[in-house]
Amino acid sequence: MTAEPARHAPDDTSLVERARTGDRDAFEQLVRRHNQRLFRAARAVVHADSEAEDALQQAWLAIYRALPGFRGDAAFATWATRITVHAAIRVVRKRPELIEVTDETSAGPDGELERAEVGRLLETCLAQLPQGNREVMVLRDVLELDTAETAACLGISEEAVRVRLH
């Protein structure tokens, strides 16, 4: 009976191998498994849901096209996050103006309002950081990647990650 869950939840490596051979279901499983994480990474860079969705769509296309070249040197999630961050950066570079953080608070329990306020405050603070530092901060402290994963996602050294985070 322990073999059943393994068949229902294959690891990323087997899904990537199956997706490389054209298995659409395997790629769909990768998308479902990692979409929320990649959306959060894109959203942290572009600061707007609609632009994050656009960047994420571009990222998934790039990920699909690049699957044959995926060597497995890093985890699939790290590799996909790197592609997503770069797609989001391209979106930001295409627009010269900054997007203002909007007030999207909805009525609800006090705890929800506090979390929403903290979220807006965090977004406002992150928006004031220079782009390179903001990416490191989001990957390390929001998405909780380690230094090596952050460096791999951004294509910089671990020392550069530590310096930017500091």
Image (spheres, rainbow, N blue to C red):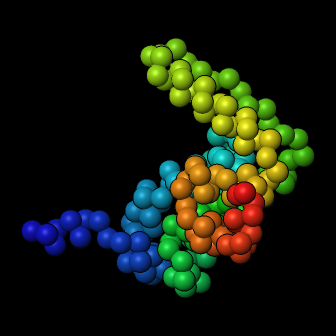
Observer able to see residue 31: yes
Q: 65 left or right of 164? A: left
Work out whether residue 82 or residue 123 is closer to the camera in this orientation and state it: 123
Give the residue drawn at x 53%, y 28%. Answer: 115
Q: 149 left or right of 160? A: left
x and y percentages locating residue 114 in the rendered image: 54, 23
Work out whether residue 26 or residue 152 is closer to the camera in this orientation and state it: 152
Give the residue drawn at x 72%, y 43%. Answer: 126
Quadrant position of residue 154: bottom right
Give the residue drawn at x 60%, y 25%. Answer: 117
Quadrant position of residue 125: top right
Observer able to see residue 23: no
Q: How many marks?
A: 0
Residue lying at the far front in this picture: please name it: 166
x and y percentages locating residue 61 in the rendered image: 61, 64
From the viewer's perspective, is residue 16 above or below residue 85?
A: below
From the viewer's perspective, is residue 138 above or below residue 23?
A: above
> From the image, which quarter does the N terminus lie in?
bottom left
Give the residue drawn at x 74%, y 69%. Answer: 160
x and y percentages locating residue 119 in the rendered image: 60, 33
From the viewer's perspective, is residue 153 above or below residue 32?
A: below
Quadrant position of residue 7: bottom left
Residue lying at the far left in this picture: please name it: 1
> From the image, which quarter does the C terminus lie in?
bottom right
x and y percentages locating residue 133 in the rendered image: 76, 55
Work out whether residue 131 or residue 148 is closer to the camera in this orientation and state it: 148
